[in-house]
Amino acid sequence: MKLVLALTGASGVIIGRRLAEELKDQELHLIVSSGARKVAELEGVDLGGIEKFATKVWDEGDMGSALASSSNIVDAMIVAPTSMKTLSAIASGYSDNLITRCAENVLKTGSKLVVVPRDTPLSLADIENMKSLKLGGAIVLPPVVGYYTKPKTIDDVTDFIVGKILDVVGLKHSLYPRWGSE
C-alpha cells in the first residue's frame, strides 16, 4: 500500500511516531512539519530516527515533490496529529505547503484521507471545518480513548488510537482487543 503520513504541530506527535513504526512495511512517504518537531520537543517525544520507517521523506516546503501532483496517486494519507491550522487549510483548499497540497490531491482523486484532529474543546469553526472535510470525503478520527480496552499505560492509549487509524485505512493489526473479545 502506498501511504503518506504527515505529522503537524498539534499535541500528540507520539501518535504519528507510533504510526510510522506500524507502517514501516508499506510504501511510506513521510512529511514532518516544523511545528510537529517543536511539539515533539515540548512533549519529550523522540522523533530522531523516524525517517528510518519511511520509504521517502519529504520536506513540508517541497512543492516540487511528486506528492504535489494529483498524477501521483496514493492509496491513503494520514495526518496525525492534525493541528487546527492544517485542518482548516485542508478544509478550505488552502494548499500552502506539501502537507495541505497532498491532502487536496488525495481528496480530488478519491483516495482515503484520515485526519486526526488533536484539540479540545472545539470551536464552531473547528466543527464546521471537520464537517467540510467529512462532506469532501475525508475520515475525521479524533484520538478518543476506548475505555473498554482497560488501558493501563499511555502506550495502551496510543496503540488504541493507532489501531483505529489502521482499521480505517484497511490494515490488519493486533494493537488493541476488539469489543467483545476475551
Image (cartoon, rainbow, N blue to C red):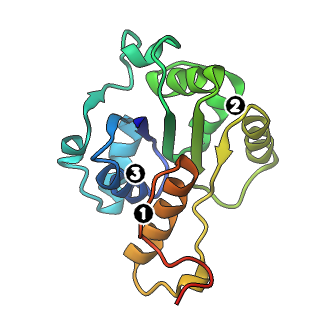
Q: Amino acid at mark 2?
A: Ala
In this rendering, the label closer to the viewer, 1 or 3: 1
- The residue pinned by badge 3 equals 16
Q: Amino acid at mark 3?
A: Gly
The mark that comes first in sequence, 2 or 3, is 3
The residue at the point 18 percent across, 43 percent down is 52
Q: CA distance from mark 2 to mark 3?
A: 21 Å
The residue at the point 40 percent across, 51 percent down is 16
Residues at marks 1 and 3 touching, judged by CB atoms closer than 8 Å: no
In this rendering, the label closer to the viewer, 2 or 1: 1
SS assignment at label 2: helix
Q: Amino acid at mark 1?
A: His
Residue 75 spot, x, y in % from top left: 49, 32
- The residue pinned by badge 2 equals 91
The mark that comes first in sequence, 1 or 3, is 3
Residue 92 spot, x, y in % from top left: 71, 25
SS assignment at label 3: helix
